[in-house]
Image (cartoon, rainbow, N blue to C red):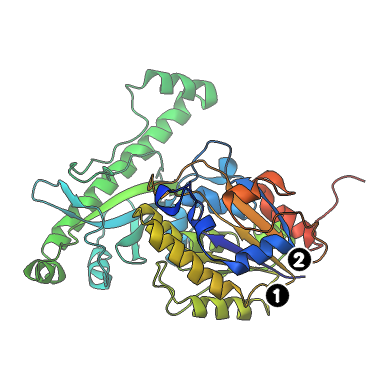
Amino acid sequence: MKAILFIGDGMADRPVAALGNRTPLEAARKPNMDEIARRGISGEMYTIAPGVPPGSDTAHLALLGYDPYEVYTGRGPFEAAGAGVDLRPGDIALRANYATVDDALVVKDRRAGRIQGTKPLTDAVGQIKLSGAQFIFRSTASHRAALVLRGTGLSYEVTDSDPHEIGKKILQVKPLLRPSEDMELARAILAGGVRKYLGRRRGANKTAKLLNDFSRKSYEILKNHPLNRERVMKGLLPANYILLRGVGIAPHLKPLREKFGITGACVAAAALVRGVCRMAGMTVIDVPGATGSVDTDLNAKREAVLQALKTNDLVVLHIKGFDEVSHDGNAPAKVQFIERVDAMLGSLIDAADFIALAIDHTTPVSVREHTGDPVPVAIAGPGVRADDVSVYSERAAAEGGLSRILGKELLPILVDLMGRSKKFGA
C-alpha cells in the first residue's frame, strides 16, 4: 500500500478577531481537507512535546518518525544537505543568510531585501580558502545559504554570528566551552574527564576562529562585489554580509527503508525539508516552479507527487507558503492560500491508498512566530476507524479518535495502517 503525507508548514493558528474569532483553517473554504477528515480519523498532535514551540528542523525530524531529542544537533546540517552537500561524519554545518550591514557592522536587514539571484556572490565567496579546514558554501533560495567546514579537530560547540535583530551589531563567534565556566568544567570532568574537556575546548576555539576569519574575508569580498555596487546604484540593499547560525554536526539518521521498511520520496522546495528527507534516505525531487513561497507552482508539485507514487511507498508533500504569510501576520492571505492548496489536494485524495494531513507547527498570525499549540492531524484510507469529525481544523481535531499524539508517533501509525509495521514481542 502507498501513502501521501501532506505537511502544511505553519498552517495551524489561533482564533483571529478579524476572522470572527475563527482560525484561518476554520475560515477557509476547503472541501477536500474536510473530506479527508470526514472519511478518516482525526486528532491533535504535539510535534515535539506539550508547550514546546517546534523549530522547523526538529518538527520535520519528528514527522518522519525520529526523536529530535536523540538526533538533533543543529539546523545547519539539514540546510547543507538540502543544498546538495554530501555531508561526511565530522562535518560542521551552519545555516547562513545574506544580510545588509552598515560600515559599523550593524545589521540593517537580515535578508538583504530578500535578494534573489545570489549565484555570483556565492561563487565569489566559495573561493575562500583558510588553513585548518575546507569551506563549502552553497546558496539555496533567495537570501538563504549553507556553510560546511570539513577537517579535523572541529567542533559544533560555538555561538552564532547572527544577532537575530535589526539594529544590533554582528557578533563574534565564540566557543561555548570557556575556562571561566566553572560549572561547565565541573560537568565535563564528571562526564568524561579534563582531557576530553580540553580537547572539546580546543576544537571549539579552532572552529570559532575559522568562522570569524571566514566572516571577515567574505565581508571584504561582498562589500566590493560588482553585483552589490549595482544594487546600491539602483537603490537596493546590498548583500554585503553573511550571518551564521544553527551550527550542528552531521547526524546519522537510520534510513526509512531500514527504520520502517518503506521507500520514500519528498516533494519540497525548502532546503531544510529537502535536507531532512535526504538524510532520511528519501528521494528528493526537483520541481520546476516550486519556490517555497505563496507563488509556488502547486500544479507542478501535485504532478510530482503523482509521478513519485509510481516508485515509492510514501511521498511527502511539503507546502511552505502558510508559514510565510503567518510570519507576516497576514490572516486574509493565509485563508486564500489554504483555499488554493485545498483545490490542488482534490486530485490527490484518491491517488494513494492513504492520505494524511499534518502540520509541523502552529504559527499564529497574531504572534508571527512558532508556538507550542497542538496541530490538527487527519488520516484517511482503507480500514481506518473513521470518527465523527467532519472538518479539518484545530478545534474539530480535538474531538477525533486519534486523541493526542506526538509528532514522532504519526509515521509509525501510518506505516501500521499500510500493513508494514513489525510486531513487538512474541
Residue in the foreground of this view, choosing between 104 and 87: 104
The one of 175 and 326 positioned closer to us in this rendering: 326
In the current view of this chain or complex, which residue is farthest to the right? 426
Give how far across and how far down residue 165 sits, in percent. 25, 44
Query: Which residue in the structure is indicated by mark 2?
Result: 381
Residue 201 locus on image (x, y percent): 38, 33
- Tell me which residue sits at (54%, 56%) in the image: 26
Pointers 2 and 1 in contact (C-beta within 8 Å): no
What residue is shown with label 1? Answer: 350
State the mark number for residue 216.
none
Work out whether residue 402 can be spotted.
Answer: yes
The mark nearer the N terminus, 2 or 1, is: 1
Kind of residue indicated by mark 2: Gly
Residue at image location 73% in from the left, 70% down from the top? 2
For the point 45% across and 24% down, the residue is 194
Disc 2 packing (10 Å; few <14; some 14–19; many ≥20): many
Q: Amino acid at mark 1?
A: Asp
User: Which quadrant of the figure has residue 226?
Assistant: bottom left
Q: SS for tag 2?
A: loop
